């Protein structure tokens, strides 16, 4: 078990910002479980996106509720997690937080040009390049997050997150 107090980190940003790649590497480095928010979408949402249709807030509600339950349950048992989740709007982040305090949003900010290049290089991902502009229009950049230049190599991003959140330093546990 980790020396850190219960903590959930949510890597957020638009499609192709590096949430999954960086999230997996960060979770591995910390020895924490990793969850890809895309895996929590109802099948109907995945089909809409696969067909190039942007999701509505009503489409996102069950998805956000599932992720909030994961965060709540993880923290309730004193656990840790890294979650990749777009969290594009302030209201979505409020739903995910739902009054919980031991969580942080890490915003991977990437230029449209780099995002477009990354999307076009992807294979076997349900999010088509046509939805990039929709995501950028939906994005409400967070004030309450750690902002990271997501164009950096994943290893550098992981190191920066760990350094800036002091995740290399032991934290007091809830049982202490």
Image (cartoon, rainbow, N blue to C red):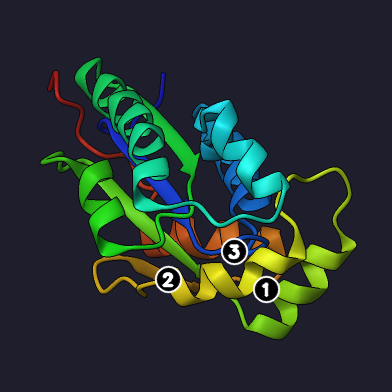
Which tag, 3 or 1, sits closer to the chain's start? 1
Tell me if residue 1 comes above or below residue 145 in the rendering. Answer: above
Place of residue 52 in the rendered image (x, y in percent of width and height, measured from the top left): 69, 56
In the rendered image, the residue lying farthest to the top is 77
Tell me if residue 28 comes above or below residue 126 in the rendering. Answer: above
Q: Residue sitting at 72 percent across and 67 percent down?
A: 130
Place of residue 16 in the rendered image (x, y in percent of width and height, measured from the top left): 68, 61
Place of residue 122 in the rendered image (x, y in percent of width and height, measured from the top left): 85, 56
Task: Say whether residue 3 is left or right of residue 46.
Answer: left
In the picture of the structure, the residue carrying the numbered disc 3 is: 157
Task: Say whether residue 15 is left or right of residue 165.
Answer: right
**Res 149 seen here:** no
Which tag, 2 or 1, sits closer to the chain's start? 2
Marker disc for residue 152 = 1
Q: Which of 25 and 61 is in front in this view?
A: 61
Q: Which of marks 2 and 1 is in front?
A: 2
**Res 66 seen here:** yes
Q: Residue sitting at 62 percent across and 52 percent down?
A: 22
Pointer 3 and pointer 1: residues touching (CB < 8 Å)? yes
Marker disc for residue 139 = 2
> Judging from the image, what secondary structure is the residue with disc 3 in?
helix
Pointer 2 and pointer 1: residues touching (CB < 8 Å)? no
> Judging from the image, what secondary structure is the residue with disc 1 in?
loop
Place of residue 138 in the rendered image (x, y in percent of width and height, measured from the top left): 43, 70
Task: Say whether residue 110 is left or right of residue 73.
Answer: right
In space, the residues marked 2 and 3 are separated at their CA atoms by: 21 Å
Answer with the quarter of the image where residue 38 lies: top right
């Amino acid at each position: 078990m980790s020396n850190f107090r219960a903590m959930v980190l949510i890597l957020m940003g638009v499609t192709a910002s590096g949430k999954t790649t960086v999230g997996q590497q960060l979770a591995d480095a910390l020895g924490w479980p990793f969850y890809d928010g895309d895996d929590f979408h109802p099948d109907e949402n995945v089909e809409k996106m696969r067909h190039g249709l942007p999701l509505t807030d009503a489409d996102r509600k069950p998805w956000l509720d599932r992720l909030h339950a994961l965060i709540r349950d993880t923290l309730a048992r004193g656990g840790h997690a890294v979650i990749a989740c777009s969290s594009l709007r302030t209201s979505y982040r409020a739903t995910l937080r739902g009054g919980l305090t031991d969580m942080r949003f890490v915003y991977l900010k990437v230029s449209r040009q780099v995002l477009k290049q990354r999307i076009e290089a992807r294979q076997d991902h349900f999010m088509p390049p046509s939805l990039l502009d929709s995501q950028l229009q939906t994005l409400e950049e967070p004030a309450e997050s750690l902002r990271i230049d997501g164009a950096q190599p994943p290893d550098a991003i992981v190191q920066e997150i760990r350094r800036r959140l002091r995740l290399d330093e032991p934290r007091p546990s809830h049982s202490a």
